[in-house]
Structures are given as C-alpha cells and as structure tokens.
C-alpha cells in the first residue's frame, strides 16, 4: 500500500428517516449538532480528508432522503460505493426491522462484484436517549449473521463514538478498494486484508 | 411588457393606430431629418432648442424664428426646419401657459404631480422626448406631441394620454380588468346586436348613428360588441377563442380596450388547452411536440428542485416562461402563437438540452440520482423523463421499456417488496403460535 495516488472513498449512509443520518454526517464532518429536524431533500454528499496509516484519503459521504415524495429519484450513486453505512435508532424498533431491506436494496442497486464480501458498517444511533428498544446484544447478533458486520453505538448529539465509527468506515472502504484493485492486478493479498477488516470490526464494537 | 405602444414586437401580431378616424386626426410620421442644419448652429441659443425656457424666452425665440424663416429660401432645408421648429415653439408656449395656470400641471414646478392613479391605471409622467414617431392619446385619439406636451402612460397596461385628457378617462386599466376576469372570452365573437346595446358605443356611450354614408360603427371581434371610431381604431389582434377552437391565428379587428386586454394577458398562462380542446394535440403536430417536451421538462424539474447546485445556479429561473415547466396544461396565448411559428418547440428543446446537460453530465449529485435498470443491470444511468424509460407507477422504479416488455411489465422491485412483506407476516404469525 505504498502508492501515493489520490484516493477517493465513496461511502453511502442508509436507514429510515429521522434515525440521525444527516446528524451523524454533520457531527463527523463539521462537528456540529442541531436538535431541530430538517428533512433532507434529495441527496447530497460531503467530503472529508482522513489519514489512515499515514495515507491521506478523501471520503465522499452520501446522505440520502427516504421520503416518499422523492421516490422518482433513483440511486445510481450506489454504484461504485466502497462502503455502506446502515443506521437505525436504538429507541425505535421499526428502524431496526428495516435494516434487512435497506441492505438488500443496496446490494441489488449497487451490484458489487462480490456481494457477500461487500463492507457494511452498522450504527445504532441515539444511545443518549431512553428508553432503549433494541439492545446491543440483539444488534450484534444481527451483525454476526451478516458476515460479521462491524457495529458501533453512537450519539450524534453528544458526538459519542462518531469519530471512531467513521474511522472504521474509512478503513473498511479503503480495504474494499484495495481489494478490488488487487483483484484487478491479480495481487493475491486479500487474505491479509480480510483479516484486518474483521479485526477492525470486532475490536472497535461498542463496549456495552 | 412593452413600454412603448408604438414599438410592437414583430412577433406580436397586434397593430394599432387610430387611422381613418372621423376627425381626420392621423399619424404624423416624422421622417424629416430632425437635426439642426449647420447654417443655423449659431442661432442655437436664441431658438431655445432642447433647453428649458421661460415664457419670455419662448416669445423671443418665436420672433427670431419668424425672422429667420423670412431670411431663408423657400425650399431650403433651413426653412423647412425652421417652420417645424416654429410649430414646436408655439406648442411649448401654449403648454407653458397652461402649466402656469394649473397648479396640478406637471410642468408647473411648484407642485407638478408625476404619478396618478385613475380608473385602476398607474399613470406616470413621461419625459419630453424627441422621437421619430408620436404616440396617440388613448382618450381623445389625437397625436401626443411628446416633445412639448405633458403626457402620461400607465405602467401596467401602456394606456397613453395627454395631461389634459387625464381627468376624463373612461377606460378601466386593462391590467385590472384582466386580473378580475382571470379568463379570456371563450366564445367566438359573441354578438348581442346593436339594438341590445341601445345603439351606444360599448365603451364611451356615444350614439352609434346608423344612417351615415360612411360607417364609423365598428365591431370588436374579441367580444362581439360595437364601438365608435374613437374607441375602436381597427387595430388587429389574434383572438384566443378562434385559436382555441379553430387553431385560427389570423389577426382580427378589435376595439382598443380589447386590444389592451389581449396585450397585457398575452404572456399569462390562462388557457387550459387540455380541458378546452384536447383534440388539438392530436391534430396539430407542433402542439403535440410541445406537450411532449413539457412532460420531459416536468420530470427534469423534479431533479433541479432538489439539487443544491442547480438552485445556486438558478437553473430553473433561466426559463423565461416558468409555467411551461411547472405544469402540463396551461398555455399563454403567446405560447400558442409561438407554437404555431415553431419558435416554442425549439426554445423548449434548448431548455431540455441545457437541463439534461446539468443532470446527466455536469452534476454529480443529479447523475447519482438517476436509475439503473435492475433487469439488465446495464451501467447506463437511466432517467425517468427520457423516452426509453419505463416508470413503475407503484414504486417509481425505472427500467428500460424494452427490458420491461421482456418481463411482461411486471415490476421486479414491487415483486420483491411484496415477497418481503409476506415473509414478515409469516414470521409474525409464527411468533403468535
Ligand atoms: N437525542 C438525539 N437526537 C438525535 C441524534 N441524532 C439525531 N437526532 C435528532 O433526530 C432527528 C432526526 O435527525 P436527522 O439527522 O435529520 O435524521 P435523518 O432523517 O436520518 O437524516 C433530529 O431532530 C436530530 O436532532 C442523537 O444521537 N441523539
Ligand atoms: Mg437526513
Ligand atoms: Zn388626449
Ligand atoms: Zn392601465
Ligand atoms: Zn366610444
Ligand atoms: Zn444537480
Ligand atoms: Zn434494462
Ligand atoms: Zn414497482
């Protein structure tokens, strides 16, 4: 991984509306949080530079709106994604139930080369709120069944775990990109990469 | 809106002048060279040219002008110019006297009023200008000598009149009338007959005398009413009802009040053609094309509305006729005229090109909000507004038309959503057992 080429990592944030997708992105990119709810219109992306293992990469983070009235807009931007972030609200059980369909829809529309190995990261947001509806254990069980998807419990409001979660997202995205590049170059380095990917997930998960 | 009623746009087939009025007041086209002949340059000051002058100055200038006329040869350029200038000076002197006698007169510096509201008109004092052509007074039909006579024009409808005619204006402002009515007369020339009008001019109420050698009774083709020649100048205009029902765009003779109403409404989307005469779309090829392009623009609009960059660049506002993008059915009379001439289809084509370039090429976000056909999984990004696209009316997913045909028009996404829903129901039932 010695190349100094400019790297752009494309990250997609998905989940039901109001779970805190826009807030998480704002907290991470601008370190700002607002209690006021402003529905996201259409889609847009923010970019942020991050340093991973002495390498500077640019993360392009796509935020989306799930509202019905924008359904005529499509999701071609899923194509070429390097990581998909699924978000639910730990106090709203329905937002957890939707995760399967968000993941399925993403895989169908993004059509990655290896759907089984595509990196997802799950965020259980709003942990500052009570009462909880979905326990950390239940979320982790779901992740285990999904190829050991990394799981983080976050609060966009208090900035809790947000930085760590996005660092893991960046690492997974970078690993995914290197892997596909390596596949192209027939560089059989993937076993090592898959290992780091898994240890990232396991290690940084929530501490509850 | 046109500010000068004598300078109609060529594409607006509305013509207007009080030609052949009874009183014989006809237009004076000033095609004579207006500039001061070289030999008279030294007299410029004494002749009070283009400058403010007191009544005394004007009297002196008139006298000097008379002297000079006698000094110059009968057919010389100088003499022609001097005669014209003498007329102008006399008018100026008269106007000056009137101004001094009337405290309301705009020329009376102590209390000149430059804005007046009468019968809904917002009348604004016009600057005294030397122009090649002179406007006509909409009240008395006389020429307005815009160089010397104080005159007013309505900001909203273009009504022009002398200062001295202002107090007796009869006609309501066309802008106000059009706003109150909100719809065109949709019947073709709906005559009620002169008897029903009691043989009175529909505007000013003058007796319409039948047994004259020459007729000064004129019918307005827009509303079918009869007018006197002071209120109907034989101006011509395209009649909305004839366009809507017959696709007949020939201009017809209309009264001045109808003319002004047709002018102020020309650009307003007042015609719901889809409702009034849907058959036209199948019979007139250009209309059919315009309809198709508007449909495409509506789909495009959905993208531009939610795109930050498009909003920052005010892309939607680049279209000078926003109603054409905002809805499908409403047309302005001008839209129909321009459809007939072929200007509108090419204009709309142009906007489709500008907007699709933003969406498909320039803007990463808009491009990202395109669709990928999940039947063929082709890399090509599809947009719901293009002809080759099939949009599922239920889930709004977009596919190639040809791909959907192969799937017997059964939407794979709807199928998937239904299956997921059924399996959820099953698992809930299982939990209950
Ligand atoms: N208490 C709390 N509220 C949050 C948190 N994250 C988001 N919110 C609030 O939840 C609402 C929806 O957030 P938003 O980011 O717009 O959700 P989105 O629709 O997924 O983008 C807003 O009122 C936020 O202020 C969080 O971590 N804790
Ligand atoms: Mg949002
Ligand atoms: Zn007049
Ligand atoms: Zn007016
Ligand atoms: Zn009349
Ligand atoms: Zn855009
Ligand atoms: Zn297809
Ligand atoms: Zn469907």
Image (cartoon, rainbow, N blue to C red):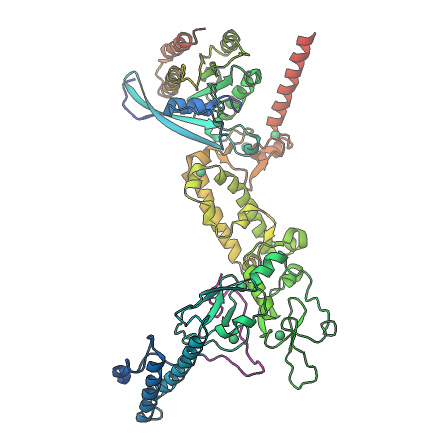
Residue at the image point whose x is 54% and y is 31% from the top: B373
Asked if residue B29 is positioned above or below residue A116 in the image, the reply reads: below
Left or right, B77 with reference to B341:
left
Outermost residue toward the left in this view: B42
Q: Residue furthest right?
A: B195
Is residue B323 in view from this perspective?
yes
Residue A51 image offset from top left, x and y in percent: 30, 19
Q: Position of residue A95 (x, y in %)?
A: 55, 18
B102, above or below A93, in the image: below
Q: Nearer the viewer, residue A46 or B340?
A: A46
Residue B277 visible (yes or no): no
Q: Which residue is drawn at 49% across and 23% down?
A: A14
On the rendered image, what quadrant is the N terminus of chain A found in?
top left
Q: What's drawn in magenta, residue-wise?
A: B1-28
Q: Measuring 59% from the left and 35% from the top, which residue is drawn there?
A: B391
- Residue B315 in magenta? no
Horizontal placement of B334 versus B72: left or right? Answer: right
Q: Name the foreground residue: A194 vs B101.
A: B101
User: In this image, A99 relative to B46: left or right?
Assistant: right
Identified at 41% across, 15% down, the residue is A160
């Amino acid at each position: 991984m010695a190349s100094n080429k400019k790297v752009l990592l494309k990250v997609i944030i998905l989940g039901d509306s109001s779970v805190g997708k826009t807030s998480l992105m704002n907290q991470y990119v601008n370190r700002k949080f607002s209690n006021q709810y402003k529905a996201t219109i259409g889609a847009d992306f923010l970019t942020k530079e991050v340093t991973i293992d002495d390498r500077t990469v640019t993360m392009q983070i796509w935020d989306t709106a799930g509202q019905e009235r924008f359904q005529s807009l499509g999701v071609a931007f899923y194509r070429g994604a390097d990581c998909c972030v699924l978000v639910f609200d730990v106090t709203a059980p329905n937002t957890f139930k939707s995760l399967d369909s968000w993941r399925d829809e993403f895989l169908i529309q993004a059509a990655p080369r290896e759907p089984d190995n595509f990196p997802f990261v799950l965020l259980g947001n709003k942990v500052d709120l009570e009462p909880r509806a979905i326990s950390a254990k239940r979320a982790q069980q779901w992740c285990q069944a999904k190829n050991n998807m990394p799981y983080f419990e976050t609060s966009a409001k208090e900035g809790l775990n947000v930085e760590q979660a996005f660092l893991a997202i960046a690492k997974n995205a970078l690993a995914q990109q290197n892997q596909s590049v390596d596949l192209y170059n027939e560089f059989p380095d993937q076993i090592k990469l898959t290992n780091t990917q898994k240890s990232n997930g396991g290690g940084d998960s929530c501490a509850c | 809106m046109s500010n000068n009623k004598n300078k109609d746009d060529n594409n607006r087939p509305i013509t207007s002048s009080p030609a052949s009025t009874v009183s014989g007041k006809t237009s004076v086209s000033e095609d004579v060279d207006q500039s001061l002949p070289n030999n008279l340059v030294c007299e410029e000051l004494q002749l009070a040219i283009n400058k403010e002058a007191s009544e005394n100055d004007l009297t002196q200038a008139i006298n000097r002008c008379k002297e000079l006329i006698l000094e110059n040869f009968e057919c010389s350029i100088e003499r022609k110019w001097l005669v014209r200038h003498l007329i102008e000076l006399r008018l100026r002197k008269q106007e000056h006297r009137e101004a001094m006698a009337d405290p309301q007169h705009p020329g009376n510096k102590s209390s000149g009023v430059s804005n007046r509201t009468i019968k809904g008109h917002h009348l604004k004092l016009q600057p005294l200008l030397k122009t090649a052509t002179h406007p006509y007074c909409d009240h008395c039909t006389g020429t307005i000598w815009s160089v010397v006579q104080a005159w007013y024009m309505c900001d909203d409808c273009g009504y022009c009149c002398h200062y001295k005619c202002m107090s007796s204006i009869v006609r309501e402002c066309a802008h106000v009338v059009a706003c109150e009515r909100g719809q065109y007369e949709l019947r073709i020339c709906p005559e009620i007959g002169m008897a029903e009008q009691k043989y009175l001019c529909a505007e000013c109420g003058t007796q319409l005398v039948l047994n004259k050698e020459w007729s000064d009774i004129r019918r307005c083709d827009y509303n079918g009413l009869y007018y006197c020649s002071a209120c109907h100048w034989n101006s011509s205009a395209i009649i909305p009802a004839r366009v809507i029902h017959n696709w007949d765009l020939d201009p017809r003779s209309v009264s001045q009040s109808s003319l002004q109403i047709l002018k102020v409404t020309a650009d307003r989307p007042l015609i719901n053609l889809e409702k009034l005469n849907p058959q036209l779309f199948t019979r007139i090829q250009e209309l059919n094309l315009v309809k198709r392009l508007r449909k495409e623009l509506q789909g495009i609009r959905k993208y531009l509305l939610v795109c930050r960059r498009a909003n920052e660049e005010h892309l939607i506002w680049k279209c000078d006729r926003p109603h054409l993008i905002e809805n499908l059915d409403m047309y302005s009379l001008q839209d129909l005229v321009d459809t007939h001439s072929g200007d509108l289809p090419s204009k709309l084509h142009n906007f489709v090109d500008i907007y699709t370039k933003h969406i498909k090429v320039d803007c990463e976000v808009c491009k990202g909000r395109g669709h990928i056909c999940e039947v063929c999984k082709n890399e090509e990004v599809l947009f719901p507004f293009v002809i080759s696209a099939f949009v599922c009316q239920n889930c709004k997913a977009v596919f190639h038309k040809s791909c959907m045909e192969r799937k017997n028009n059964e939407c794979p996404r709807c199928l998937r959503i239904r299956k997921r829903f059924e399996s959820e129901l099953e698992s809930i039932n299982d939990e209950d057992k």
